Each structure stands twice: as structure tokens, then as C-alpha cells.
């Protein structure tokens, strides 16, 4: 079963066995590739960034990268769910608590940023909303660790 480490921020890959370890490593690699492609898109298609793609809509390279990003997101999701199904209830509860924290972070951080953004002249995009999700997920992951795992 997966061992939750680093105060609820990570799981110990060595604690996974066989196909779960392989699937989790595939999930991490696919997530990194999808994240890299997302970062590439955020720079190349922004008004302030480098305009590498002159005509984004008709450019086959852009379409290929977009399809690749979607593919890697699905691979990461599929392999993570495959790992999650084989874990004990503690790890499944940890996953639920982290995702709930992310949703709350999205609502309490991301949405107010989007609502207040016109007053500051700032255009809120996906990355800012994801930041709210990530902060909430980290906070609730730590709370779960403190409540259920940490030994005094």
C-alpha cells in the first residue's frame, strides 16, 4: 500500500508494488509531459508571450501538440486511477481529502481572483485558477497528514 510522506505532499514510490509502481511512474512522466506542453502553450499563444505559431488555428504543429497534451493528460489520469483502485482506504481517503481541498481552494482563491480581476486590470487565466486548486489541495493534504498519519 502507498505510504504518504513529506507531511502529506508525496507518496513513497518504493512502498508501491509491481504494476502499481509501474503505473504511478507512468502517471508522473505523463503528467510532466502534459505540464510541459501546457507551459509551452501558455507562452506561445499569449498576447505578451512569444508568438511562435503565426496562425494558431491552421497550424498543424499546434494541433499535434494540443492532441499530444490531451493524450498525456488521459494517460496520467487512467494510470493514477488504476493505482488508486488498488490502495487501502486510508490512501483513498487522503486522495478524496486532497481533491476536496483543491475544489475549496478553487472556490475560495480562484473565483475571488476572477471576480476582482477587472478592478486590478489583470486577466485571470487557467493557471491562476489551477493555483487556487493547488494551494487548497496542499493545505488539505497537510491537514489529513496531521490528523490521520502523524505520530506524536
Image (cartoon, rainbow, N blue to C red):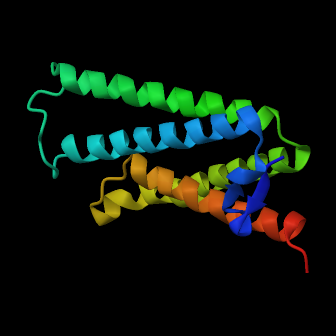
Locate residue 99, reporting x and y percent: 69, 48
- Asked which quadrant contains residue 27, the reply is top right
Q: Residue furthest left?
A: 54
Q: Position of residue 90 (x, y in %)?
A: 88, 50
Q: Nearer the viewer, residue 94 or 117?
A: 94
In the displayed structure, does residue 8 sit left or right of residue 117? right
**Residue at 42% in and 44% down:** 35
Residue 104 visible, this orientation = yes
118, 88: nearer the viewer: 88
Number of labels in the image equals 0
Establish if 107 lies above or below 62: below
Instruction: Judge from the rendering whether residue 144 lies leftward or rightward of residue 88; answer left or right.
Output: left
Residue 104 in the image, given as x and y percentages of width and height = 66, 54
**Left or right, 8 with reference to 38:** right
Q: Residue 84 or 124: which is nearer the viewer? A: 84
* Quadrant, the C terminus: bottom right
Apparent side of residue 49 relative to residue 83 in the rendered image (left or right): left
Q: Is residue 12 above or below residue 76?
A: below
From this view, report whether residue 18 is shown above or below residue 58: below
Dividing the picture into quarters, in which one does residue 56 lie?
A: top left
Q: For the point 47% across and 30% down, which residue is it?
A: 72
Residue appearing at x 77%, y 67% in the figure: 143
Residue 57 visible in the displayed image: no
Locate residue 5, reporting x and y percent.
73, 63
Amino acid at each position: 500500500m502507498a505510504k504518504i510522506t513529506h507531511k502529506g505532499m508525496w507518496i513513497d514510490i518504493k512502498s508501491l508494488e509491481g504494476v502499481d509502481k509501474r503505473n504511478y511512474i507512468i502517471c508522473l512522466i505523463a503528467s510532466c509531459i502534459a505540464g510541459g506542453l501546457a507551459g509551452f502553450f501558455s507562452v506561445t499563444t499569449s498576447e505578451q508571450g512569444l508568438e511562435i505559431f503565426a496562425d494558431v488555428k491552421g497550424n498543424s504543429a499546434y494541433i499535434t501538440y494540443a492532441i499530444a497534451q490531451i493524450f498525456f493528460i488521459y494517460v496520467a489520469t487512467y494510470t493514477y486511477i488504476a493505482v488508486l483502485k488498488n490502495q487501502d482506504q486510508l490512501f483513498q481517503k487522503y486522495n478524496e481529502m486532497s481533491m476536496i481541498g483543491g475544489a475549496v481552494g478553487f472556490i475560495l482563491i480562484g473565483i475571488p481572483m476572477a471576480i476582482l480581476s477587472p478592478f486590478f486590470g489583470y486577466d485571470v487565466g487557467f493557471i491562476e485558477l489551477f493555483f487556487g486548486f493547488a494551494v487548497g489541495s496542499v493545505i488539505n493534504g497537510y491537514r489529513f497528514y496531521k490528523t490521520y498519519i502523524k505520530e506524536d
